[in-house]
Amino acid sequence: MWYFRSPEIAFGEDALSRLDHLTGKRAFIVTDPIIARLGFAERVREKLQAIGIESAVFAEVEPEPSLQTVRRGAEAMLAYGPEWIIGLGGGSSMDAAQAMWILYERPDLSPDAINPFDILGLRQKARLICIPTTAGTGADVTAGAVLTDTEEKRKLEVGSLEATPDLSIVDPQFTTHLPRQVTADTGIDVLTHSVEGYTSTWANDFSDGLCLQATRMVFTYLPRAVEHGAADMEAREKMANAATIAGLGMGNSHIALAHALGHSAGALFHIPHGRITGLFLPYTIEYTANAGAGRYLDLAHILKLPATNETQAAASLAAAIRDLMRRIGQPLSLQAAGVARENFEANLEPLCDRAAMDVSLVTSRRVPGGEDLKRLFEYAYAGRPIDF
Amino acid sequence: MRFPSDEWIKALHEEINRSQAYAEAAKNWEGDFYFVVKPAQPGAEPTYLYMDLWHGQCREAFLATDPAAKKLAFVMSATLPIWRKVITKQLDPIQGLLTRQIQLQGNMVMIMKNVKAAQELVECCTHVPVEFSE
């Protein structure tokens, strides 16, 4: 037995007008200072005001939101008493909104104790809407949130199947003017979600098609979105949709080894999530395929890559991903990502320890032990294809 | 070996202590378990398998005749068909927990930080010869 969970999804031009049909008295918008400054929060507030819903804005979410920020936001929600929580922004804001919502519903919980095994009894006070302003994370449709424990310098994947948002609004107006680097970083995140969602050991009939479609869309539209930005609205809209499609696929399957390595390295070297997990993706494809454990043939075929067996498919796919990353200016190694050799060596042990404890590892088709983890990081540092 | 039985859990004890992969994955694990096999028939008694797992080793394991004698950190309960699926790797134990086919009492955060250890424990189970008393 397994589940497929999805919010209602409003997508396409003017999808924001879905807000016109809300009913209620109060909404609480969770976002970051940049999104607030760009006027996006105000656009949402105006929509709400027009239908008689008053709103408050919490614009304090930082990149890699901390447990402390989540606690502060939840306290503000408790004081305000909203019926709608709106996560507006990239993955950080949507993840923070989701975690704050859970604590608003269940103030007896500690953020690091939110887990998928307990019945939380959400939706007694409010419902969750997510509005992504990047085309990457898929956090608008997934049940898990990534928070940072700043004291332990560790990323926590927290969540509950109940915490899947009620409504996702994928409106390309919010991603039109994304900077080139953010487009690339978040766009490659979509690919890591779709490939790992397809190859995770929890992949299933319902998630497979979504992951394949999102993979194809990234290869078609990401280079255009990076190169032409606001001048190519078709690419913008397709990438916004691809992010949510991949999020649905991955969210109903799971992630895998590239995320385990990326969570660890991202926390220690402060590299954006999409960039760092994408960096590891070709290495983990090679590592998995080298043990005959891959599931890459369909992915290669949908991209029309040359492959008649799993070994060829993995090699073709890894090469195609590296080619795509070069085209959009993403680093292919930790060294190219700006990690100094001495910093890498000083952190190699905690890198491996954190990756070994990451929940993403459990759904990897090939799970590395301590020595293999070390070699994976060393190869990824130097940019060497995996040969073990 | 019949599952559940004292013989089977003691064989698993030995298998765990032979596993380098488990030792590594569970090096931070502290806590003892009851694996409870819930009865198929209403009114029948459950079976309790006790395991003391400590930093990658199993210190003790037996079929418990007096489950109330120990207050344990973790209790995992499921019916025999579900345990059979777990032991034969047809059901990922974490998926079993997420779908509530397996019920868990104990520190959930600790479990979430040690999912690899759970996987290796199941791997050890697959190396113990087993017959199911269904």
Image: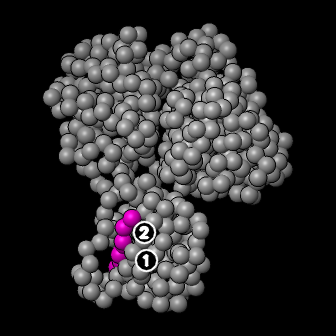
x and y percentages locating residue A309 in the rendered image: 82, 53
Spatial CA distance of label 1 from label 2 is 7 Å
Looking at the picture, how far across and down is residue A113, in whole percent? 31, 49
* Apparent side of residue A53 relative to residue A277 in the rendered image (left or right): left
Q: Disc 1 marks which amino acid?
A: Arg
Q: Quadrant of residue A371?
A: bottom right
Disc 1 and disc 2 on one polypeptide chain = yes
- For residue A339, say whether it is visible: yes
**Residue under the point 23% across and 81% down:** B68
Helix, strand or loop at mark 1: strand
Q: Is residue A306 left or right of residue B57?
A: right
Q: Position of residue B102 (x, y in %)?
A: 39, 67
Mostly what secondary structure, the magenta segment? strand
Q: Residues within 10 Å of mark 1 (few under 14, many from 20)?
A: some
**Cβ atoms under marks 1 and 2 closer than 8 Å:** yes
Task: Give whichever of A330, A317 is nearer the camera.
Answer: A330
Magenta span: B30-38
Whether residue B37 is in magenta: the answer is: yes
Q: Quadrant of residue B78?
A: bottom left
Label 1 is found on which chain of the structure? B
In reply to whether residue A369 is colored magenta, the answer given is no
Residue occupied by mark 1: B59
